[in-house]
């Protein structure tokens, strides 16, 4: 499916309108997940996998005649702000898809070292920041993104663990928290660091007035 489209839907951040076609899609996905759990109870049953495969089975026609550029494309990842629009004809009716631009809701993010993180705040004698490489790309995403939905690069499950490690699994969540803290996104303190009163958190607001800490 990704080979055919160039990209896929990530159900970690998406929005659905309650139309007959969308309700039908949801029921079909639920049915497929139920069958998967019966056939292979020890494996995770990913809603994202079935949302994409069911839609692909309907035969999505994208507005552009060219396949979407994948996350490996530097232009797509950091500069192209265009959404991709497609239409699928389901048994319940017409269904429209809109894939948001990667630099608006980034999923593949540069992972910065401690030194690279420090460079984000460094200014020369004239008070100018001169960012290069990954810090420059990261700052670009911070400026353009409405929501950062970065996949955690650390502690990814090994091939044999994928059957049990899924979104929301403690190992996956720990990797997300580690990434967010290392990238300067996570503002909440660890339990042992919290004061007695409830702790709020602050976020960096970009040019759109949207906080990166949610």
Image: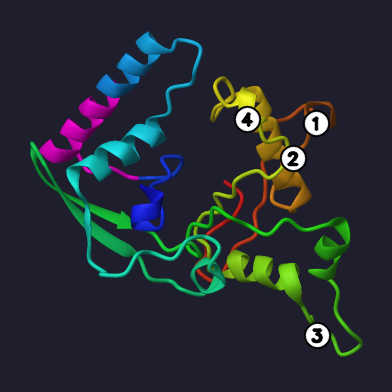
Q: Compute the Cα span from label 4 to label 1.
A: 40 Å
Residue drawn at x 88%, y 84% as measured from the top left: 124
Identify the mark nearer the N-term, 4 or 1: 4
Residue drawn at x 34%, y 21% as measured from the top left: 33
Identify the mark nearer the N-term, 4 or 3: 3
Q: Which residue is mark 2?
A: 178
From where the camera sits, is residue 172 visible? yes
Q: Nearer the viewer, residue 86 or 146?
A: 86
Q: Which residue is mark 1?
A: 195
| Circle on res. 128 | 3
Mark 2, secondary structure of its residue: helix
Residue at the extreme right of the image, as rendered: 125
Q: How is the image coloured?
A: rainbow
Apparent side of residue 23 relative to residue 92 in the rendered image (left or right): right
| Circle on res. 159 | 4
Q: Compute the Cα span from label 3 to label 1.
A: 37 Å
From where the camera sits, is residue 19 visible? no
108 up-or-down from 142: above or below:
above
Identify the mark nearer the N-term, 3 or 1: 3
Query: Do labels 4 and 1 touch, CB within 8 Å?
Result: no
Check disc 3: other Cα within 10 Å, few if <14, some if 14-19, many if 20+.
few
Q: Nearer the viewer, residue 180 or 29?
A: 29
Apparent side of residue 162 relative to residue 127 in the rendered image (left or right): left
Query: Do labels 2 and 3 touch, CB within 8 Å?
Result: no
Check disc 4: other Cα within 10 Å, few if <14, some if 14-19, many if 20+.
few
């Amino acid at each position: 499916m990704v080979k055919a489209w160039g990209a896929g839907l990530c159900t970690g951040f998406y929005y659905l309108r309650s139309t007959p076609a969308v309700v039908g899609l949801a029921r079909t996905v639920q049915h497929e997940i139920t069958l998967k759990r019966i056939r292979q109870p020890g494996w995770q049953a990913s809603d994202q996998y079935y949302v994409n495969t069911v839609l692909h089975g309907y035969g999505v026609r994208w507005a552009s005649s060219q396949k979407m550029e994948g996350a490996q494309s530097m232009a797509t990842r950091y500069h192209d702000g265009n959404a991709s629009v497609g239409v699928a004809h389901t048994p319940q009716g017409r269904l429209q898809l809109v894939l948001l631009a990667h630099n608006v809701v980034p999923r593949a993010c540069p992972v910065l070292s401690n030194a690279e993180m420090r460079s984000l705040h460094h200014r020369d004698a004239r008070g100018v920041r001169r960012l290069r490489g990954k810090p420059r790309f990261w700052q670009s995403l911070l400026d353009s993104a409405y929501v950062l939905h970065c996949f955690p690069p650390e502690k990814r499950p090994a091939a044999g663990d994928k059957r049990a490690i899924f979104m929301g699994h403690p190992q996956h969540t720990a990797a997300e928290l580690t990434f967010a803290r290392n990238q300067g996104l996570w503002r909440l303190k660890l339990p042992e660091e919290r004061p007695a009163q409830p702790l709020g958190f602050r976020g960096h607001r970009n040019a759109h007035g949207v906080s990166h800490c949610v």
